[in-house]
Amino acid sequence: MVDPTPERGERIAKFLSRAGIASRRDAEAMILAGRVRMNNTAVTHPAVFVQPGDLVVVDGKAVSTPERTRLWRYHKPDGLVTTHKDPEGRATVFEHLPPGLPRVISVGRLDLTSEGLLLLTNDGALSRLLELPATGWLRRYRVRVHGGVAPEKLKRLADGMVVDGTRFGPIEAHVDSIQRANTWLSVSLKEGKNREIRRVMDALLLPVTRLIRVAYGPFQLGKLERGQAEEVNGKILREQIPSLKT
């Protein structure tokens, strides 16, 4: 687990997040909706601490004590949304995971038409930690755009851009290859705001026709087949995330 608080126990939203029930924010919403009980008493606010031996129940079902923190690399195919339940009824990542995985949540997201590396974990606190820009991990992508990419457009990316009132930080990009009317780019960024690459490329009149995430910090897509998941070795996980205790 990440950043335990053994003296008082653990905030209930964090406990639910680590147990893989929901993200911390969603867990707080579940609490406010009256869906959570502890020791047969309704939990009415998030500032409740769970101690060893406490019985936590969500929607009438007991929540098991969170397991050790685990992380998986997953090759997300395009055509899947990164959500547990889609209001539009589209197919989700979590409906198409390989058999044998426990309940997991994603580290960040890849949109419907994006593909490549998606990190999955059973620990919501770890997911939140790895999503923070302060972690400083690069997200690396291979991006196919329609059209030629002039050097001045690469410079605009490197300088950072404002698109529709949203400020995007510097994005490192260079041309890998040109195929007829398309250009393949290698793109690296740290923050990863919602649809960031597509939005800045659209602003440069370079519509994205394919987007593949190949690395998230030290973890790489490698030779994972589409739809395949592989657990990160616990020793490697601890080496890459020193604050982690598994």
Image (cartoon, rainbow, N blue to C red):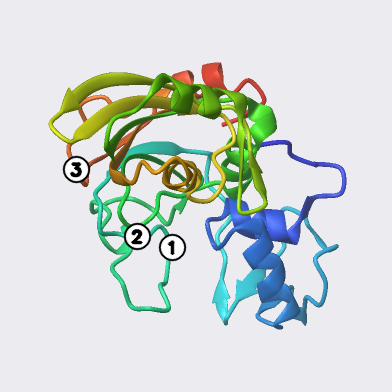
Residue situated furthest top in the rendering: 239
Q: Using the numbered discs, state the Cα–Cα distance from disc 2 to disc 1 in whole angstroms.
A: 7 Å
Label 1 CA crowd tier, 10 Å (few <14, some 14–19, many 20+):
some
Of 59 and 226, nearer the camera is 226
Q: Position of residue 238 (x, y in %)?
A: 54, 22
Left or right of residue 76: residue 54: right
Earlier-in-chain disc, 1 versus 3? 1
Disc on res. 94: 2
Q: Which of the two marks, 2 or 1, is nearer to us in this view? A: 1
Q: Which of the two marks, 2 or 3, is nearer to us in this view? A: 3
Q: Which residue shows up at 52% across the image and 46% down it?
A: 67
Left or right of residue 240: residue 141: left
Write down the quadrant of residue 44 in the picture: bottom right
**Residue 234 visible here:** no
- Asked if marks 2 and 1 touch (Cβ < 8 Å), the reply is yes
**Residue 21 visible here:** yes
Disc on res. 83: 1
Q: Using the numbered discs, state the Cα–Cα distance from disc 1 to disc 3 in whole angstroms.
A: 18 Å
Mark 3, residue position: 226
Q: Give the residue type that dot 3 points to.
A: Arg
Q: Position of residue 198 (x, y in %)?
A: 42, 46
Q: Using the numbered discs, state the Cα–Cα distance from disc 2 to disc 3 in whole angstroms.
A: 14 Å
Q: Give the residue type that dot 1 points to.
A: Thr
Write down the quadrant of residue 111 in the picture: bottom left
Of 91 and 235, nearer the camera is 91
Q: Which residue shows up at 26% across the image and 24% down it?
A: 222
Q: Give the residue type that dot 2 points to.
A: Phe
Q: Secondary structure at mark 1?
A: loop
Disc on res. 6: none
Q: Position of residue 97 (x, y in %)?
A: 27, 54
Earlier-in-chain disc, 2 versus 3? 2
